[in-house]
Image (cartoon, coloured by chain):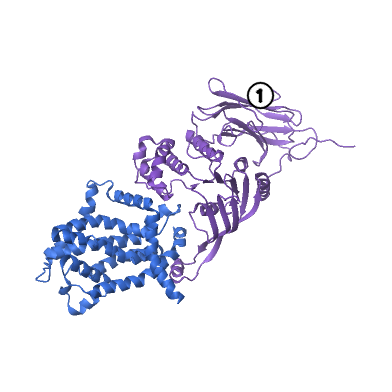
Chain colours: A purple, B blue
Amino acid sequence: MVDMALSMKDVSKYYKYYENELDRVKEILSGKSRYQKIHALEDISLEVEPGEVLGVIGQNGAGKSTLLKVLSGTILPSSGEVETSGRIAALLELGASFHPDMTGKENVYLTGAIKGMSRQDIESIYEEVVAFAETGDFIDRPVKTYSSGMFIRLAFSIATHIDPEVLIIDEALSVGDGAFSRKSFDRIMDFKEAGKTILFCSHSMYQVEALCDRVIWLEDGKIRKEGTPVDVISEYSELMRMSAPRKEPLGDSQETIKSEPCNEIEKQTTGSSALPSIIEVRVTVDGKENKVHKVISEESDLEVTVLFDSGKGIPPPSVAIGLSGGDGRILSSAGSVHDGVELSVNGKGQGVAKILFPKLPLLRGNYYLDVALLCERGIHLYEAARQVAEIYVEQKGLERGVVKLPHQWLP
Amino acid sequence: MSYITGYFRNIVGGFINPCRAVFKNWSLYIMLLRRDLINRTSGTILGKVWPLVQPALQILGYWFVFGVIFSVRAEGRGPNFLEYLLVGMLPWLCVAEVISRSTSMFREFAPLYRRNPFPLELLPVLVMTIPCLVYGSAYFFLNLVIGGIDKALLSLFVLPMFMLWLIPLCLLFPVLGLFIKDFGQAIPFLLMITLFLTPILYFPSMLPQGISRIIWINPFSDLMAIVHGVLQDSEYNWLNVARPMIIWLLLLGPCWLVYKRSIPHIREVL
């Protein structure tokens, strides 16, 4: 039998609500309950094997954060058993235990001590922590004098250098800005490659699917579904789509062509010359670069060219193209990393990614083109250009819907 | 029967669990002590001298009011007033600091335990240790000057004795201070009254007969009688030992129970 990295048996967590705070005191003094229960988790049983990457998804208020806090030991469960093996690093509210008047060095020792490390253990990792955090001489100054970036770098560095067996991540796969965001992402990926157990809670279904071996979907404090990322995320995404407010159906109206295509890059991450960035996006229809991208369904070829700077000292990035409708729902996407295409870079560190959508099978309507520049794994986002171009599709037939599927009528 | 067993189990728990938390988290305990000592003096010109200067200034103030202005004299009752005042006042300042700090302890240390699996049983010991260290060294030198090395060595047991006696209060007051805000507001007044009801600023023999009985209801009077008895050869008897001990035993179990029950609530409140 495998010893589990994490195990929860019938774990429930409820928060106590008191109409009057004095009732809480009376309860503590007398031992008699005077509260109403607000359930955050109900009878959760879960086992995570060593080396497994478990995704946790669910809407806001589903109990995801409570689950992570219970597993990290920050809060105690109201009932049930939680067993963990080895040290846990939780990337939740980084730097929360830092004392502003203490120096970075003292805070490293303090955090290590809170995590149960001896002074010798902390001393053995201290140099690595400081080097990774890139704090330089600031390590001997009070952390209240740090910039927010430096503060988070040090907190992340400590959290991930305590040699954890289990890493708990809430939302962000990277922290900090500029080059450090990439560095912190690599650090997390190193944990995955080293076979550490990871719990990853996120609203990004793409990242959950890309990273996780198994996913649990929490709803109202209970596990609604558990299984492979494909199964769970498909059902979850469908539910999200159904519950989202409905907009005008695409391609159903005879809209006129909208004025100007956007053609502007909306930067998602902070610009840094060390990190890859989009230089230009060109869109052509049948080889022509017009201001208005007018496409004839199933006839026109749509070509997108992305010029990018590949950054310094990191592998060339990957590019992803998305086509979305007016309601923001992605209708289709293509990624160089998923298609097995390695993008090359010239001597100046610049590269070009070209993609062709031959005889575009979209049906009548307005569509938007999104471009994203990601890491070589296709997970970490460097930069995104939202609605970089608007594509107006016309059609000759009267078919309805968004896309014309390849088909044939059989005799 | 089970009620009595539970009661005694809580008495043992109230003493053992905070001690166990210290031993299990020794490295953290030392770190927090260091942090606290640094915080006390960081940014000040006198720096590490402040822990000695601060009690000295307070004692100077009391001596000026009671010794100079009110001209309290020993008049054959025992040691001279200044020596008597110093020997009683330093432990009291330590006690007063422990009590007022323990009342706000959960709020003060909230960043440490709110988002971390932090052993909350460690906090009462921490709150007691720091004043003990700060005042302890000053107290040792004071008794060395007043009574010589024998008395100075005996004085090393005085503050730990007070801290031991304060364990129940240091378990109860943080809970009351967190959940009943008025309690924190009332503490300075209660400390002032207790100071006046304890023979520190005056000799016990100076009290009128009727009031002296009220004074001996106060367990701090017994503890002070022991301190003056041991360090200044004043009279004290077995009742001065028995009364605080009985009160301690009566308080420790229930106070630990309250502390234990409050732990799940503490993170939720803050």
Quadrant where the N terminus of chain B is found in the figure? bottom left
Q: Residue at x 63, y 46 (%)?
A: A214
Q: Residue at x 14, y 63 (%)?
A: B83
Rendered location of residue B99, percent (x, y) = 31, 63
Q: Residues within 10 Å of mark 1 (few under 14, many from 20)?
A: few
Rendered location of residue A4, percent (x, y) = 57, 50
Residue ID for mark 1: A289
Q: Secondary structure at mark 1?
A: loop
Rendered location of residue B180, percent (x, y) = 39, 65
Give above or below for A262 relative to A37. Answer: above
Quadrant where the C terminus of chain B is found in the figure? bottom left
- Does residue A223 appear to the left or right of B210 in the view shown? right
Q: Is residue B106 visible?
A: no
Asked whether A384 or A8 is in front, the reply is: A8
- Does residue A56 appear to the left or right of A35 in the view shown? right
Q: Residue furthest front?
A: A1
Residue B209 lies in quadrant: bottom left
Rendered location of residue B124, percent (x, y) = 36, 60
- Does residue B208 appear to the left or right of A220 in the view shown? left
Residue A12 lies in quadrant: bottom right
Q: Residue furthest right?
A: A411
Q: Amino acid at mark 1?
A: Glu
Q: Residue furthest bottom?
A: B210
